[in-house]
Image (spheres, grey):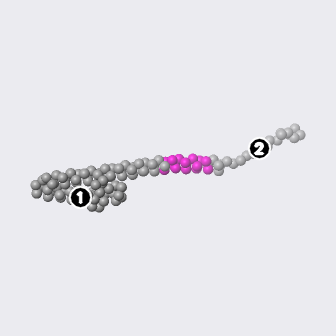
Amino acid sequence: MRSNGDLFVVAVVRDVTERVEAERHLHESELALQQAERALAVAGDREQIARDLHDTVIKRVFAAGLSLQGAAARADDATRARVEAVTAELTGRSATCAPRSSRSRPSTGRSAGFEAGCSTW
């Protein structure tokens, strides 16, 4: 602008310090959220793997107990006594770590095998 030959400059200045700081904080928060989401996903995967391993172990212990009971039926008295002791130990172990939900029960349920389905299922 010119007025009587003098040059005047009009300028508008705005302090954006707070906005820049808020955007930086927002970016940091988004990064932290992404890291937390990844950690949560990993934890979920680990829990699923643990459940799957747990179920597999229970099934194998149950199968081993059934197999031992079958062998005990054909064994002499001394061997039968030892096999029954091992079966009792397996029953205690599987009962300790057996899942409590009905969906995890062995398909034999409460049949006569392996201490009636380890009795706590």
Q: Is 58 on the left-hand or right-hand side of 80?
A: right
- Position of the N terminus by quadrant: top right
Residue 96 visible somewhere in the drawing: no
Could you tell me residue 105's position as x and y percent? 32, 56
Query: Foreground: 84 or 6?
Result: 84
Taken as a whole, is the magenta stretch helix, strand or loop? Answer: helix
Residue stretch in magenta: 22-36
Q: Is 117 on the left-hand or right-hand side of 1?
A: left
Classify 10 Å Cα crowding around label 2: few (below 14), some (14-19), many (20 and above): few
SS under mark 1: loop
Which residue in the structure is indicated by mark 1?
A: 112
Q: CA distance from mark 1 to mark 2?
A: 93 Å
- Position of the C terminus by quadrant: bottom left
Which residue in the structure is indicated by mark 2?
A: 11
The reply to whether the magenta stretch includes residue 28 is: yes
The amino acid marked with disc number 1 is Ala
Q: Residue furthest right?
A: 4
Q: Residue at x 49, y 49 (%)?
A: 37
Q: Residue at x 45, y 48 (%)?
A: 41
The amino acid marked with disc number 2 is Ala
Question: What mark, if any, has residue 50 been given in the picture?
Answer: none
Q: Is 18 on the left-hand or right-hand side of 68?
A: right
Q: Residue at x 35, y 50 (%)?
A: 52
Query: Foreground: 27 or 45?
Result: 45
12 up-or-down from 76: above or below: above
Q: Earlier in the sequence, mark 1 or mark 2?
A: 2
5 up-or-down from 113: above or below: above
Query: Foreground: 73 or 81?
Result: 73
Could you tell me residue 19's position as x and y percent? 65, 49
